[in-house]
Image (cartoon, grey):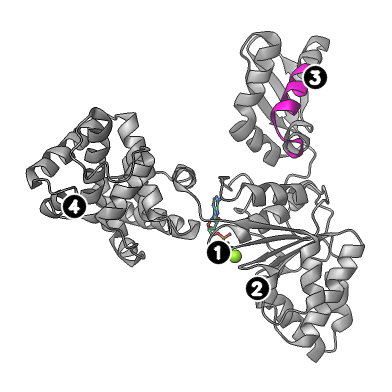
Amino acid sequence: MTEISEIWSKAKKQLSDEISAVSYETWIKPISVLSADDKKITMEVPSPTVRSMLLTRYNSIITDCIENVTSRKYALEVLVANKNRRDYRPVAANTLPENLLNPKYTFETFVVGKNNELAQSAALAAAEQANVYNPLYIYGGSGLGKTHLLQAVGNYYVENYPEKKIIYTTTEKFTYDFVAAIQQKKTFEFKQKYRTADLLLIDDIQFLSDKTQTYEEFFHTFNALYEAGKQMVITSDRLPSDIPHIPERLRTRFQMGLLVDVQPPEFETRMAILKDKIAAENISVDDEVLEYVAHGIRSNVRDLEGAVKRMMAYGAISRTNKISMELAEKALKDIFSLMPKKKLTISSVIDETEKYFNLPSGTLRSKQRTARVTLPRHIAMYISQSMLGASQAKIGREFGGRDHSTVISATKKIESLLSEENPEVKRAITDISENLSRD
Ligand code: ADP
Ligand code: MG
């Protein structure tokens, strides 16, 4: 036992160098090592959240660090400490039904990518009461996970600090409640309710009514909680400076905290999100189909979820739990046709491909036929055909007046490389298509 605790403390030291301080504090520190045999190490953690986080995100890094210390590979067994408080509910003393958080909106179900990692880690820091950013203000377009992150903070509180009073509310609800309180002469109860929160989560602050009184009340609530050191997390579709009518002093308050944005997910993250959502369902979908969806839907996560739901529904109707390309196309036809079409031209495909391969502008249209030039040219022809649906004759003309048969043989060549899973070609096509679809 002393041996295993020694191993673990060495491994922890390494882990603290490998991962961020916040992650270390949140996920590694709560671990106690119970026992070890020659194959596995058994650990105990205080909550199912920590357990699933360890198993999904930190498993391999923990086993690697242990391997560095012991020169052998151990499996991890993670148990949740039984503290007889498993059946928690977000209904602490003063909470009202509107506080009910969607239990699906947690940090574990939130897929982190470049587009949202800052927002995610700031939210996590707020959740673990690091109290460094107050308020935390998360802003960005619709369907990008703001409400999800906001509620993840709430769900984290519910699970880890069940005694705390959490208020999750939309701005509309706040306004409505306040107006109702005035009418029913219950403003004292209203103030009491909001100003005694330990955590205030306010969704969509851009809808804060421009009624002066509501602003005033919100401002006082904000100050009361701020001075008491209570965490507030706010979401909005825009920066405080872009909310019309907002009084300057409230704007200043928001800017005292941390402003972080969420961006539309890039291709890799869209794939990861799709895989995550599919994994929760009893259905199998080939990567090829997922790529098709991830290419087609770029705007936001809500639409990705919608696509998954449609595929599921079509699967159910066709009594299959394997989604073929054909079925996916059928399921998503309507959605895809609504997607804004970018003004793509053969010319932009050529430019993007030259850029990707670091070729001087004009190379692909030229007569050069060295290997360094022909593969990119074939790829660009292939993309022109598959993404733009341009005719072979037209493609030939744009590529420096080549014959349509040249285009046919180029696309055939690329198709055969793709069917052999050629990684370079696959990567190039994915990246170039991706770059082309950026605004
Ligand atoms: P917003 O509030 O920004 O409009 P939501 O938080 O309501 O967006 O997100 C829309 C849907 O997409 C929700 O069902 C949410 O769970 C899901 N979602 C958004 N971002 C992610 C993500 N990074 N990982 C997993 N699901 C996500
Ligand atoms: Mg929202």
| Residue on which disc 4 sits | 398
Asked if residue 34 lies left or right of residue 61, the reply is right
User: Ligand 1: does it lie within 8 Å of the C-beta at label 1?
Assistant: yes
| Residue on which disc 2 sits | 242
Viewer-nearest of discs 2 and 4: 4
Q: Nearer the viewer, residue 396 or 49?
A: 396
Viewer-nearest of discs 2 and 1: 2
Query: Rounded to the nearest whole Å, what is the CA distance between mark 2 and mark 4?
Result: 44 Å
Mark 1 in CB contact with mark 4 (< 8 angstroms): no
- Disc 2 is placed on an element classified as helix
Asked if residue 58 lies left or right of residue 4, the reply is left
Res 379 → quadrant? top left
How many other residues sit within 10 Å of disc 2, few (<14), some (14-19) or many (≥20)?
A: few
How many other residues sit within 10 Å of disc 3, few (<14), some (14-19) or many (≥20)?
A: some
Mark 3 in CB contact with mark 2 (< 8 angstroms): no
Q: Earlier in the sequence, mark 1 or mark 4?
A: 1
User: Ligand 1: does it lie within 8 Å of the C-beta at label 4?
Assistant: no
Q: Earlier in the sequence, mark 3 or mark 2?
A: 3
Viewer-nearest of discs 1 and 4: 4
Residue at 37% x, 43% y is: 355
Res 49 → quadrant? top right
Mark 3 in CB contact with mark 4 (< 8 angstroms): no
Q: Which quarter is ligand 2 in?
A: bottom right
Q: Position of residue 368 (x, y in %)?
A: 20, 35
Q: Which residues are magenta?
A: 10-22
- Residue 141's mark? 1
What residue type is disc 2 on? Answer: Asp
Residue 201: in magenta span = no
Q: Nearer the viewer, residue 406 or 205?
A: 406
Query: Rounded to the nearest whole Å, what is the CA distance between mark 1 and mark 4?
Result: 37 Å
Q: The N terminus lies in which quarter of the figure?
A: top right
| Residue on which disc 3 sits | 9
